[in-house]
Amino acid sequence: MVFEELTLKHELLTIDEKKILRDEIYCDKLIDSMMKHIGSTDPVLRDELIYTNLSKFINGGIIPQSKILNMLEICLDEEHLFYKIGEEKTDSVFTRSFSSLVVALILTKEDGTLLDAKKFLEIQTAIFKYLDKERDIRGFVENKGWAHSIAHGADMLTALISHAHFNMNLLSDVLKAIETSLLKDVVYQDEEEERLIFAVEVLLEKGMEKQMLMNWIKALSSTLNKEHVKSGQTLPFYRSKINMTNFMKSLYFRLKLMNPDKELLECLEHEIHYWFRKTYGRG
């Protein structure tokens, strides 16, 4: 049995952490209820109460490791991260998006002792699949709060790369996941493209060679150019171009602050300038 939404909201508004620590049955019921209602359309319950308290519990070591593993299993299942995946502009996005945030929380806190290689492989496969299949890319939804699926997916991807078990042999898969996210048929309005930059930053911190990044930047631009040659000035092309150039502009200034490599910055400058000239015929 789990709490219904109104009861859960009351429990979280009047939360007693000591009760959670000393009463295992209550703790299980509370966590199970939070996972059950993680996609609630009530933004206060979903974002301010469920997510905020799960973050506090996970980071504070309040939840037993066995329960955290159970939560991870739930987050990755067909009723959470992949719940009605492919739908657009429906409430199912809240379940998927906030499940991804819990995965990110667990990966960020976990030091490599809880997850074995098999489980980590399952997680990374799920993350790449999610970013490829997600179609509801809304940011803020009126009266229902943040969906922000791609931003939360980017947080999950960044947590994956930061984890002790992450293998840099997967670097091309990560870059492909970022590319897929940028080339969806939408113009991002709520800084989704900037959240994807954190994944690039962690890759660089973990030793990604600048030539690899430069090659990817050029290939990303080339992919978009081929689409333009093939289909012309279509709306999907236009939207992808905006996302890509916004991403490159933001990446340029982030790298200028954290890793001011002249060759890498010049590569970004070249591609940004190329698309400006191609769009406006000047400069």
Image (cartoon, grey):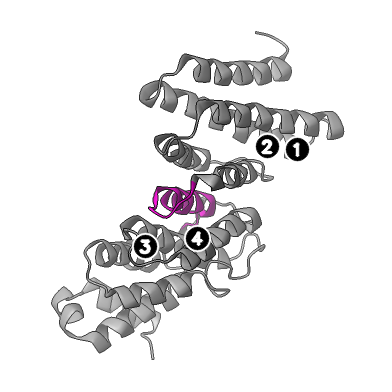
Q: Secondary structure at mark 1?
A: helix
Q: Are marks 4 and 3 in contact (CB under 8 Å)?
A: no
Q: Nearer the viewer, residue 41 or 223?
A: 223
Amino acid type at mark 2: Arg
- 18 sits to left or right of 125: left
Q: Are marks 2 and 1 in contact (CB under 8 Å)?
A: yes
- Residue range corresponding to the magenta coloring: 146-167
Position above or below: 8 against 210: below
Marked residue nearer the N-terminal end (4 or 3): 4
Mark 3 vs mark 2, foreground winner is: 3
Position above or below: 212 against 70: above
Q: Check disc 2 and report the residue beneath it.
A: 239
Q: Check disc 1 and report the residue beneath it.
A: 235
Label 4 to label 3, Cα distance in Å?
A: 15 Å
Amino acid type at mark 4: Ser
Please indicate, yes or no, whether residue 91 appears anywhere in the rendered image: no
Disc number placed over residue 106 in the picture, else none:
3
Q: Secondary structure at mark 3?
A: helix
Q: Are marks 1 and 4 in contact (CB under 8 Å)?
A: no
The x and y percentages for residue 141 are 51, 55
Quarter holding the C terminus? top right
Q: Secondary structure at mark 2?
A: helix
Position above or below: 279 against 250: above
Please indicate, yes or no, whether residue 128 appears anywhere in the rendered image: yes
Marked residue nearer the N-terminal end (3 or 1): 3
